[in-house]
Image: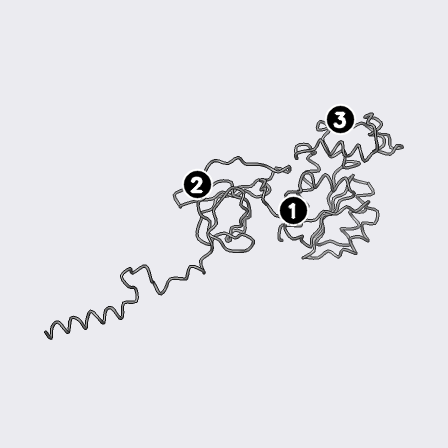
């Protein structure tokens, strides 16, 4: 009888001190509560995420199994791709740590591109505008940039503003007040040696050597930045210097209507970066990088 009482007391002591219960994994007192774990997000095609370790930001284009475990391939807006292991808490969405998980549906997807050639994310929301700006000379320049790069610019929170002419560029830059948190990129037409635009660019960069970038294309007007084949002509007509350039183009092509109507006719034919001359493409991409990539 005494032996039985002793065994009962030992059993009772074990039950009282057993913090884990019958399942040693169910009530681990050292385990972090679930609410403190990064939320799980399916690695669906087009989801834009950032790698915590490298800072690489891109949209999901592929998920696959590798020796290291589940991996995700991301593509940034320049078409650069990188592969990452889907570790817990290894990624960010809008600054929030998340854990990527394999999507429930892994059916093949068709990669859709924006007009600039970047991966198109149809549900992408426009970001809050950055204090940085990109300036172009006129409305036509702004409309062309929007037609090709609008998707990228809205995703990055970049605003493009027309100058309505570059004659007062130095005063405009002075009023803007460029700084490390307020960078300014400027795209000028006809930026060639000896031109008025080149002199303006030199003066601006002399006055404001930091936090500003001035680039340009060699064309008389942004109309010429559109490849002639895109609008069904072999080349742009040559207009005598004594004649207004746009009026000369409209007359030479025999188009009816105003210059504004002629531009809309041109713009309607532009649907992809392939319709734009490389000298224009490279300069716009350079400015987008300048105002969005942290230095």
Identify the disc placed on residue 235. Answer: 3
Q: Residue at x 33, y 60 (%)?
A: 26
Left or right: where does residue 197 sit relative to residue 273? right
Q: Which residue matches tag 1?
A: 154
What is the number of callouts on the image?
A: 3
Residue 143 sits in quarter? top right
Q: Which residue matches tag 2?
A: 64
Residue 277: x percent and y percent?
A: 70, 34
**Looking at this view, is 244 or 115 the one in front?**
115
Above or below for 20 versus 127: below
Residue 47: x percent and y percent?
A: 53, 45
In the image, which is nearer the foreground, mark 2 or mark 3? 2
Farthest bottom residue?
A: 2
- Secondary element at tag 3: loop
Above or below for 99 versus 280: below
Farthest left residue?
A: 1
**Looking at this view, is 58 or 290 the one in front?**
58
Q: Quadrant of the N terminus?
A: bottom left
In the image, which is nearer the foreground, mark 1 or mark 2? 1
Q: Residue at x 71, y 38 (%)?
A: 280
Residue 56: x percent and y percent?
A: 54, 48
- Neighbours of disc 1 within 10 Å: few (<14), some (14-19), many (20+): some
How far apart marks 3 and 1 lie (CA) works out to 33 Å
Q: Earlier in the sequence, mark 1 or mark 2?
A: 2
- Secondary element at tag 2: strand
Q: Residue at x 88, y 32 (%)?
A: 243
Residue 89: x percent and y percent?
A: 46, 54
Above or below for 36 versus 250: below
Q: Are marks 3 and 1 in contact (CB under 8 Å)?
A: no
């Amino acid at each position: 009888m005494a032996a039985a009482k002793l065994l009962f007391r030992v059993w009772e002591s074990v039950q009282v001190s057993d913090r884990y219960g019958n399942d040693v994994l169910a009530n681990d007192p050292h385990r972090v509560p679930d609410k403190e774990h990064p939320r799980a997000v399916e690695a669906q095609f087009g989801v834009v995420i950032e790698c915590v370790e490298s800072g690489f930001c891109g949209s999901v284009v592929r998920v696959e199994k590798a020796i290291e475990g589940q991996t995700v391939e991301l593509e940034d807006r320049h078409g650069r791709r990188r592969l990452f292991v889907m570790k817990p808490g290894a990624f960010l969405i809008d600054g929030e740590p998340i854990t990527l998980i394999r999507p429930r549906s892994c059916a093949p997807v068709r990669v859709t591109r924006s007009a600039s050639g970047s991966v198109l994310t149809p549900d992408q929301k426009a970001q809050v505008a950055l204090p940085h700006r990109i300036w172009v000379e006129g409305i036509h320049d702004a409309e062309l940039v929007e037609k090709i790069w609008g998707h990228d610019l809205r995703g990055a929170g970049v605003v493009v503003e027309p100058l309505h002419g570059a004659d007062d560029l130095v005063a405009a830059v002075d009023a803007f007040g460029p700084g490390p948190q307020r960078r300014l990129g400027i795209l000028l037409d006809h930026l060639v040696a000896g031109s008025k635009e080149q002199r303006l660019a030199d003066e601006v960069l002399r006055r404001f050597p930091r936090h500003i970038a001035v680039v340009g294309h060699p064309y008389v007007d942004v109309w010429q930045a559109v490849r002639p084949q895109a609008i069904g002509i072999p080349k742009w007509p040559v207009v005598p210097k004594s004649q207004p350039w746009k009026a000369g183009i409209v007359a030479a092509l025999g188009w009816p209507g105003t210059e504004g109507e002629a531009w809309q006719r041109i713009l309607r034919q532009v649907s992809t970066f392939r319709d734009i001359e490389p000298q224009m493409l490279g300069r716009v991409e350079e400015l987008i990088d300048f105002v969005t990539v942290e230095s």
